[in-house]
Amino acid sequence: MFLSVKGLSKSFGELDVLKTINITIDEGNIITIIGPSGSGKTTLLRCLNALEIPDEGVLAFHDGFEIAFGNKLKKKKLMELSRKAGMVFQSYNLFPHKTALQNVTEGPLIVQNRNKNEVLELAESLLHKVGLADKMNLYPHQLSGGQQQRVGIARALAIEPELMLFDEPTSALDPELVGDVLKVIKDLAKEGWTMVIVTHELKFAEQVSDSIIFMDQGQIIEQGPPSQVLKHPKHERTSQFIQRVV
Ligand code: ADP
């Protein structure tokens, strides 16, 4: 067990967006989350990175780190949680006035206060890894959407997280640019990264996932290997969703 999510709940005012979510993620596994818009997928992902703070629930990591949400939550624990996971956003969220390289070095230099030369070397090797060795000194507006998203992936990797989270990483991209980004994610999968990916790309989910979670209205409706969830869903709501998306 790499991470266990126990009884995670989150409301925004009257709206119960996550209703007692339980998930177990094994080391090196890739979990994809699918489901209709508004079902709570992004909120769940953000809760794993302290970008949203759940009202209740516990996250327990393989190394003994545990965080229990509720009144007794300590800020220091949230900082620690945010460093465990690297997040890749749908809309890239790059700093527009920084180069690709500066976007990647920002986290480790400013937030983690690490050695400058070491961080530069790391950032260059990560940009190389995502196929952008020749674009390091360009600004986001000089890059295609797919290239910007690959900078986003390099930036998330730069904090040297234990877990990678992707929030619909290709949904803002023109169709012809989707492939390059998915390839980078597949390469990370081959390297053994543990990843949680929210996606509408069911074909991609089928190819990379160890397990697919189908969410609806803040609940996990079903979870299982792609062959089950996509081909032989147990629940009517899942099959309706899949038919609609394909
Ligand atoms: P999904 O990723 O499945 O589309 P989200 O997690 O983005 O779903 O959103 C789930 C629900 O929570 C939606 O109804 C959305 O409007 C609501 N929601 C998300 N973030 C906030 C917020 N910060 N404040 C209020 N409501 C929110």
Image: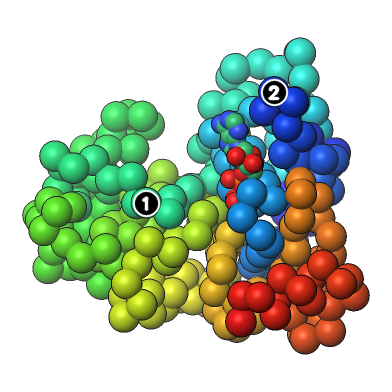
Image marks 1 and 2: residues in contact by CB distance under 8 Å = no
Please say if 206 is above or below 11.
below
* Residue 13 disc label: 2
Image vertical order of residue 213 relative to residue 139, above or below? below
Query: Image check: 96 left or right of 73?
Result: left
Left or right of 33 in this view: 80? left
115 vs 176: above or below? above
Is 159 in front, or is 95? Answer: 95
Dot 2: few (<14), some (14–19), or many (≥20) neighbours within 10 Å?
few
Q: Quadrant of the C terminus?
A: bottom right
Q: Name the amino acid type tagged 2.
A: Gly
Residue at figure coordinates x 34%, y 67% from the top left: 173
- What residue is drawn where x is 85% and y is 40%? 20
Residue that numbered label 1 is attached to: 91
Q: Residue 73 location, x and y as percent?
A: 71, 18
Instruction: Provide residue 204's location: percent of width, then percent of height.
Output: 55, 79
Task: Say if disc 2 is inside 8 Å of ligand 1.
Answer: yes
Q: Earlier in the sequence, mark 1 or mark 2?
A: 2
Task: Name the residue type under label 1.
Answer: Ser
Q: Nearer the viewer, residue 138 or 194?
A: 138
Q: Is residue 129 visible?
A: no
**Left or right: residue 112 compared with residue 84:** left
| 160 to 20, vertically: above or below | below
Q: Residue at x 9, y 54 (%)?
A: 137
Task: Report the Cα–Cα distance between label 1 and label 2.
Answer: 26 Å
